[in-house]
Amino acid sequence: MPLLEVRNLEKNYKDGDTETPALRGVSFTIESGEFLAIMGPSGSGKSTLLHILGLLDKQSSGEYLFDKKGWDDYEEDEISHIRNKKMGFVFQAFNLLPRTTVFENVELPLLYSDVPESSWKKRTLDAIEAVGLSHRAYYESSQLSGGERQRVAIARALVRDPQIIFADEPTGNLDSKSGGVIMKILRELNESQNHTIVLITHETYTAEHTKRIIRLMDGKMVSDEPVQKRRSINDHNLK
Ligand code: ADP
Ligand code: MG
């Protein structure tokens, strides 16, 4: 049973009289434990697709099922609950709180969860360890490099133990070396902890760390193929 099913998905943005078709009939499924990249040039519909998959936006037509249920199967307030509990998000801009420590940034999603407070500290430290930042746990986010900040954002996405992690261009603001470290961490989360990860990127050398690549062009899916030759995990010289 797939974790996520997309059938003939369409999205049109309406702005007054103008309509922009952003997705024009996209279909695929994702199983639990997969690590895949959605690729395509700027404007091809990647972020639009990710917003729909992450229940941040609703499709115009077609069907989207997460864990066998679609938007119409949930009450409005359940949607945010599903999103908070079952999904983790990482964006290009790290979106950390300033003047706040790594620990506090990562712990934050637990404050709005039903996870018992007695386990917050352990969960937070475990998530920080998973991204290799234990030695920075009590630094302020402003004292970190860009790559380290993105690792904090990944830890924050992990802390509630989501069923799936969505990452939209997580290496987009980073130099290739820091980007390589991020990809290595995502691979390890997938390989040793079996996290399901959907990554958006326009860079082939980033996508080749995953196991499957879906390519979009002008809102349509042009290919969906396994990665034949994955990049070496130690290949940090990614350019
Ligand atoms: P990508 O992430 O691949 O660069 P997007 O999903 O952001 O592509 O955008 C796909 C198309 O939809 C583009 O033509 C873009 O201009 C348009 N678009 C995206 N978001 C909006 C919006 N909120 N309102 C109107 N048009 C939008
Ligand atoms: Mg985008």
Image (cartoon, helix red, strand yellow):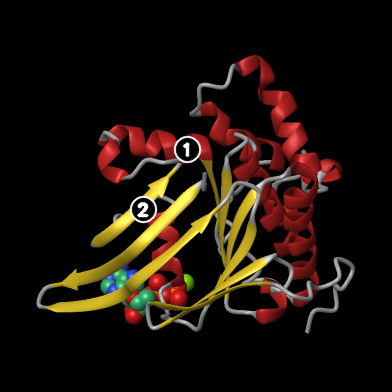
Q: Nearer the viewer, residue 101 or 40?
A: 40
Disc 2: residue Cβ within 8 A of ligand 1's nearest atom: no
The disc label shown at residue 64, or none:
2
Residue, x 47% and y 37% (percent of image)?
A: 84
Residue at 68% x, 44% y: name it.
Answer: 155
Q: Amino acid at mark 1?
A: Asn
Does residue 127 appear in the picture of this structure? Answer: yes
Where is 143 relative to 39, above or below? above
Disc 1 residue crowd, few under 14, some 14–19, many 20+, Cα 10 Å: some
Q: CA distance from mark 1 to mark 2?
A: 18 Å
Q: Which residue occupies the foreground of this view, 224 or 12?
A: 224
* Residue 203 point in image, percent of width and height: 64, 79
- Residue 84 placement, left or right of 130: left
Q: Amino acid at mark 2?
A: Tyr
Could you classify mark 2 by the number of other residues whose Cα lies within 10 Å: few (under 14), some (14-19), or many (20 or more)?
many
Q: Which residue is mark 1?
A: 84
Judging from the image, what secondary structure is the residue with disc 2 in? strand
The answer to which of marks 1 and 2 sits earlier in the sequence is 2
